[in-house]
Image (spheres, grey):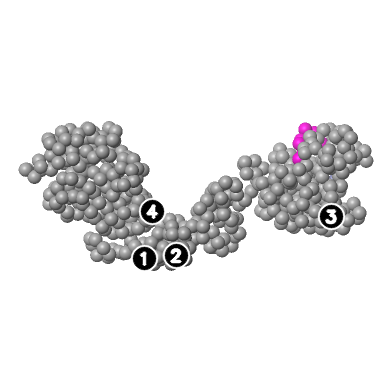
Amino acid sequence: MRSRLFLLAMLPLACSSPGASSSSGSGGEGGSSSTTGPGTGGAGMGGGGGMGGMTSSTGVGPGSGSGGSLPMLPCDAGFAFDSNPITSPILTVSYTNQTPYAYVNMKVTGPGAPASQWGGVGGSGPYTWTYTVYGYDPGVLTFTFVEGENGGNPGNPVAQCQIEALVEGSTNPGSSGSGGGGQASCADLAQANGWPGGTFTCDDGTHNWCAGTGTPTSDCVRCCSPSCGVLAQLYNSSASCDDGNNGACKGSGVLTWDCKAGCCGPGIPNSQPPTGGAFGYPVGDKSTSPAGGAGWQVWQVLGHYWDVYGGAHLAEDIGKAGAANAAVSSVADGVVLVSAPNGSSYVNVILIQHPMPDGTSVCSFYGHLATRTVSPGQTVKRGDQIGTVLDQGSNSHLHYFIAPKSLCDKIAGLNGGGACGYDGSGGVPGLGHADLANAPESYTASGTNNGCSLNGYQILAPHDFIDAHHF
Ligand SMILES: [Zn+2]
């Protein structure tokens, strides 16, 4: 009984550190810094091992308790860990207290872990344990410093700290107590961290492959996440680093040791393929404005009124001598919505939808095709060949335009139909056949032409759009 009273009297000390006293609503213990008398802390804590006010002690901020490394998770002052968050199953944990206890131990609980108890320390603090924690899963581990738990006496929890474990605990039980078990293997670390494919890179500590940021493990001097190049191989993909600013994968790529903002590429988990902002021309060198270079020219601009057809042109025509059967490529990454024969002089048409960085999408339409080499639903990359230019002799050309989503939906709903070549209007006044300088960037169709109407629909001039979103 004397021992019990002694311990109760000491309790306020354990909880009266600056960190604890800064907590809110801590059941009365926080305000007491007295070294004498049970105070309110003693009353709250003495009820036979209940956590009492202690568990309501929340969050000493970073910088208190252990030299700045402690935690954003709730933690009473006095705890120190050799790593925070935990990156190795071998931990050194200490709890600092000015008051000698007759018998103290540390309890550890966490995901996947049976309650484990490190104990049997007496005398003056600080108390330090170096132990291997077995069997826990990545997640939050809770360390509880308990005094007086002995011989069936449940003891009193004195202080508590939560810390995040990033690794899986050792699966080797080894010997009980301190030592044994070893560090997590690199394979365990890869699994615990969800590294794609369970792959990893060993750093030998001299090549500095991981720029010194790897985690020491039992089988690697340092164990690192896979590099972006390894990921690319793993997923048979082309990979690129997102710098976190260009929106290439919107920051959602897989973090690797050499791509801190994310490794992105088609098929790589958690990454989005580069979208939008990367348009090129459908023919020629696919890059040179206004029609892809290599002799390709804009033969008829958007909005040009041609009396032969009784309306304004609702696309751009691009051609050159020898254009017949030339390859036609997708102007950007996207999904094929339509690839179909067409009863008009288009003969074959293709409609491809392209996602844009802002979440919207546009479509590209291609007409006067001799062949089609893609299918609806197929994903294409910018520059992938989708067909060839129809042979119309010296008039061989590609008729193409960029469609806002509303127009795209209309054409897709008609399986490529409805893409009138001309409207029923007078077009842009004074605009010449190939007058690029004065051609509009967009044009809204008006009227009906040969029974075809896109009245009210906006069409975007492809060369302007591509230039504005050029790769
Ligand atoms: Zn045309």
Decide which of 165, 308 is in the foreground and name it.
165
Amino acid marked by disc 3:
Gly
Which mark sits nearer the N-terminus, 3 or 4? 4
- At x 73%, y 46%, the residue is 466
Is residue 346 something one can see in this rendering?
no
Secondary structure category for the residue under label 4: loop
Secondary structure category for the residue under label 1: loop
Q: Count the marks.
A: 4
Residue labelled with disc 2: 203
Disc number lying in front (3 or 4): 3
Q: How far across and down, in percent of the image, does residue 153 sit?
A: 14, 47
- At x 84%, y 50%, the residue is 297
- At x 18%, y 40%, the residue is 13
Which mark sits nearer the N-terminus, 3 or 2? 2
Residue interval drawn in magenta: 452-460
Task: Answer left or right for 78 relative to 406.
Answer: left
- Above or below, comparing residue 231 to residue 17 in the picture: below
Which mark sits nearer the N-terminus, 3 or 1? 1
Q: Which label was assigned to residue 295?
A: 3
Residue labelled with disc 4: 166
Task: Answer left or right for 24 relative to 150.
Answer: right
Which mark sits nearer the N-terminus, 4 or 2? 4
Decide which of 368, 279 is in the foreground and name it.
279
